[in-house]
Image (spheres, rainbow, N blue to C red):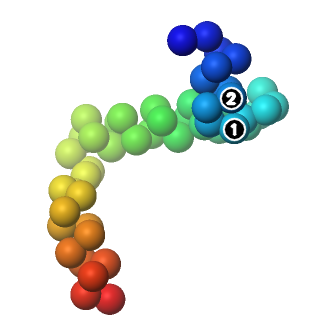
Amino acid sequence: MSIEIYRDMLGVGTDEELAASLQALEEGVADVDAGRTRPFRDVLDELDNV
């Protein structure tokens, strides 16, 4: 995928916005690798009970 298509999909226009987006993705992958995640269904169930 080209960087132009990626930017268009994410709605990031500036280099700063792109850098922030990529940093957030890297942090998310690090959380998954470190086991700092919860099953999506658990989160949905919790939100239903709020």
Q: Residues within 10 Å of mark 1 (few under 14, many from 20)?
A: few
Q: Which mark is residue 8?
A: 2
> Where residue 3 appears, x then y in whole percent?
65, 15
Question: Where, by quadrant of the figure, is residue 6 drawn?
Answer: top right
Residue at disc 2, secondary structure: helix
Q: With respect to residue 38, does 23 lie above or below? A: above
Q: Nearer the viewer, residue 24 or 6?
A: 6
In percent of width and height, residue 31 lies at 33, 43
Which residue is at 27% across, 82% downward? Answer: 48
Question: Mark 2 belongs to which amino acid?
Answer: Asp
Q: Nearer the viewer, residue 12 or 35?
A: 12
Q: Position of residue 7 (x, y in %)?
A: 67, 27
Residue 19, compared with residue 28, is above or below; it is: above
Give the residue type that dot 1 points to.
Gly
Considering only vertical position in the picture, is 15 above or below 1?
below
Q: Which mark is residue 11?
A: 1
Left or right: where 17 falls relative to 5: right
Extreme residue toward the right, this view? 14
**Image quadrant in which the N terminus is located:** top right
* Residue at horizontal 24 percent and vertical 58 percent from the top: 40
In percent of width and height, residue 43 lies at 26, 68
Viewport quadrant of the C terminus:
bottom left
The answer to whether residue 19 shows anywhere in this view is no
**Residue at figure coordinates x 78%, y 27% from the top left:** 15
Q: Are marks 1 and 2 in contact (CB under 8 Å)?
A: yes
For label 2, the crowd category at 10 Å Cα-Cα, with few meaning under 14, some 14 to 19 and many 20 or more, is: few
**Front in this rendered view, residue 41 or 20:** 41
Task: Tell me where residue 9 sits by quadrant.
Answer: top right
